[in-house]
Image (spheres, helix red, strand yellow):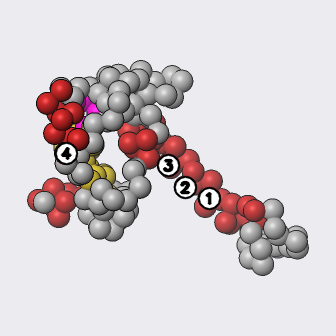
Amino acid sequence: AEDLDLRLGRANGNIFHRKTGIDGVHDGQIMVRLKKKRFIIIDYGILPTTADLQAAAINPHVSAPDGAGKTQCVSPNCVKVGVPVLLYDSEPTETASLYMRSGLCFMCQRNLNEKRRTQRKRKSDVGGGGGNAADGNCTKRVKLNG
């Protein structure tokens, strides 16, 4: 709770590294704010034991998916762990986070999120109004002088 209040902040997408990772191996333990009231704690450095898997099976806030802690990131040039253990999800009934289901390590997923965010931002700037150019529904072309 202290980490949440003091280190994570209140903005979506904020992160706090609770344990640093090992270069070229894994990204460590990270706390991520997904929505204003939802946050998750994921750890790429834990290789779950049988006891961990059993505990995760009975606690809805915890998850150890297949390959957690050992499956390599699906990004072509990355050798880090791509499937984390979910140590805590404040809203386990919500859809699983992309960090849990993408198969990407934390940094590759973060870079992809940033790339998508910037592309959406550019597309909305291009539209200018009257239609959404990103959807191809813009019927008028307007030339702006300036």
What segment is highlighted magenta in the picture?
A: 42-46
Q: CA distance from mark 3 to mark 2?
A: 6 Å
Give the percent coordinates (x, y) of residue 126.
73, 64
Would you call the spot at circle 3 few (<14 residues within 10 Å), some (14-19), or many (20 or more)?
some
Q: CA distance from mark 3 to mark 1?
A: 11 Å
Q: Are marks 3 and 1 in contact (CB under 8 Å)?
A: no
Question: Label 4 sits on what residue type?
Answer: Ile
- Give the label on residue 117, or none: 2
Q: Are marks 3 and 2 in contact (CB under 8 Å)?
A: yes
Disc 2 on helix, strand or loop?
Answer: helix
Mark closer to the observer (2, 4): 4
Q: Is residue 63 above or below residue 130?
A: above
Q: CA distance from mark 4 to mark 3?
A: 31 Å
Q: CA distance from mark 1 to mark 2?
A: 5 Å
Name the residue carrying label 4.
Answer: 58
Q: Earlier in the sequence, mark 3 or mark 1?
A: 3
Question: Label 2 sits on what residue type?
Answer: Arg
Q: Quick check: 52 left or right of 121? A: left
Q: Quick check: 74 left or right of 59? A: right
Q: Earlier in the sequence, mark 4 or mark 3?
A: 4
Name the residue carrying label 1.
Answer: 120
Which residue lies at the image location 13% right of the left edge and 60% below the top edge? 1
